[in-house]
Amino acid sequence: MKTLVGIVATAIALYLWGFLFWGLGDIPYSGWKQTADDAATQQMIREVFPESGTYYVPGFDHEPEERAWLFEQGPVGFVHIDLDGRPEMDPMIMGTGFVLNIVIVALMAAFFKVARAKEFRDFVRLSLIGGAVAVVTIHGGDMVWWQTPVEWKTWPLIYDFTAWLLVGHLLGFFMKSSEAT
């Protein structure tokens, strides 16, 4: 029961941390660029992209020589398109985000159980190492393999690492053995 309470309490704390990190300023978005004309860009997107989805430009349907030439000529882009639009602060995203946090925290609780974490320092160590491995694998991989700009990926990396630390410390408080200190 203590672990279940810990999962819910930690998911709430993680949700609040996400709100603070992403919602209280524009520093995390400093790596994003602005188009010269958003309305014209939106119109161009409607005309050029046939449906909602993720696009890599140039696409992979070209002959290898043509694709190589297009890559060398540039520009090269990786873009996610939603042609239908949505509210800026979509309540559905906020709700599914909280459910995602529950899943993340529950998986980390399972990870700590499998790793046989008992003392608070076990949870701290595991969250440090696990968080480092996760952010280097995910965000480092995006920077290397997908050429996602460092100016952008630094912020999700910082958020995700601090989220691991937050979850590890809070779950450690709830999951540590009664006889461990």
Image (spheres, rainbow, N blue to C red):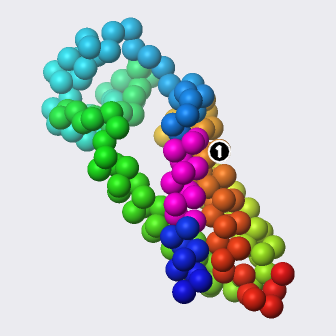
Classify residue 144 by image quadrant.
Answer: top right
| Amino acid tagged 1 | Ile
Q: Where is residue 65 in the image (x, y as percent from the top left)?
A: 34, 30
The C terminus lies in which quarter of the figure? bottom right
The N terminus lies in which quarter of the figure? bottom right
> In the figure, 94 relative to 30: above or below?
below
- Per the image, the residue denoted by label 1 is 158
Decide if residue 95 is on the left or right side of residue 127.
left
> In the figure, 93 relative to 22: above or below?
below
Decide if residue 61 is on the left or right side of residue 12.
left
Q: Position of residue 76 (x, y in %)?
A: 41, 26
Q: Where is residue 82 in the image (x, y as percent from the top left)?
A: 24, 36
Q: Which residue is at the far bottom? A: 179
Q: Which residue lies at the image location 52% right of the left edge and 80% below the top edge?
A: 4
- Residue bounds of the magenta highlight: 10-21
Q: Decide which of 110, 1 is in the foreground and name it.
A: 1
Q: Which residue lies at the image location 45% right of the left edge and 68% below the top edge?
A: 103
> In the figure, 12 relative to 162: above or below?
below
Q: Which residue lies at the image location 25% right of the left edge and 41% below the top edge?
A: 53
Q: Decide which of 120, 30 is in the foreground and name it.
A: 120
- Estimate how packed mark 1 is, as few (under 14), some (14 to 19) or many (20 or more) residues with alpha carbons within 10 Å: some
Q: Position of residue 2 (x, y in %)?
A: 59, 83
Decide if residue 3 is on the left or right side of residue 99.
right
Residue 55 appearing in the image: no
Decide if residue 49 is on the left or right side of residue 57.
left
- How would you classify the magenta stretch by its main secondary structure? helix
Q: Which residue lies at the image location 32% right of the left edge and 15% below the top edge?
A: 38
Circle 1 — which element? helix
Q: Which residue is at the far right? A: 181
